[in-house]
Image (cartoon, helix red, strand yellow):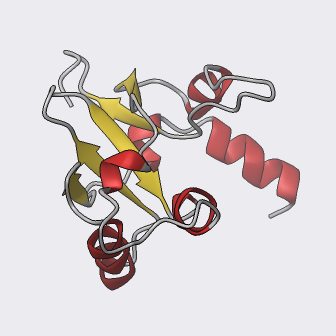
Amino acid sequence: MSGASWLREVLSKRAEELADGDPLLADESSSAKEVAAAMRERGKCAAVDGFRDGSLGIVTERDVPYGLVAEGLDPNSTPVGRLASRPLESVREGTLVEEAVALWPRGASGGSRWWGPTAASGDP
């Protein structure tokens, strides 16, 4: 399959077809080291972080070198919530990947590259 046809196929899928049905969940107060170890152990590239206020964030494998190491933070004492991108954006069940990607922020500020599909009702 050529790169262009592969991309067309992926973009035409529904977001939930690509979503991880068994996400790694972490509490905002867990240490960055604990969460990174759990990500490695479970073969995950990200963890969904729950915050006391009920919001969700996400920590990715990129957040460790860019947010932890580059800032000189101690992985044993830095809460993973400090590294999390918030809020974790969501798209409704049935949203095409092409539509979801179009929602990503553009420009130098970056923004989240992740979203979590929710049920048609809006529930996670």
Q: Is residue 18 above or below residue 121?
A: below
Q: Quadrant of residue 90?
A: top left
Q: Identify the residue shown where x is 28% and y is 28%.
A: 118
For the N terminus, the image quarter is bottom right
In the depicted view, which residue is nearer to us: 32 or 72?
72
In this view, which residue lies farthest toward the bottom? Answer: 41
In the depicted view, which residue is nearer to us: 49 or 104?
49
The x, y position of residue 107, in whole percent, is: 80, 25
In the depicted view, which residue is nearer to us: 74 or 88?
74
Total labels: the figure holds: 0
Q: Quadrant of residue 69?
A: bottom right
For the C terminus, the image quarter is top left
Residue 8 falls left or right of residue 96: right
Q: Identify the residue shown where x is 38% and y is 47%.
A: 82
The x, y position of residue 109, in whole percent, is: 72, 28
In the depicted view, which residue is nearer to us: 98 or 27?
27
Say if residue 13 shows up in the picture. Answer: yes
Q: Identify the residue shown where x is 47% and y is 24%.
A: 95
Say if residue 22 shows up in the picture. Answer: no
Q: Quadrant of residue 77?
A: bottom left
The x, y position of residue 2, in whole percent, is: 86, 61
Q: Is residue 121 above or below residue 64?
A: above
In this view, which residue lies farthest toward the top? Answer: 121
Residue 8 falls left or right of residue 25: right
Q: Identify the residue shown where x is 80% and y is 29%.
A: 108
Q: Is residue 6 above or below residue 111?
A: below
Residue 99 falls left or right of residue 124: right
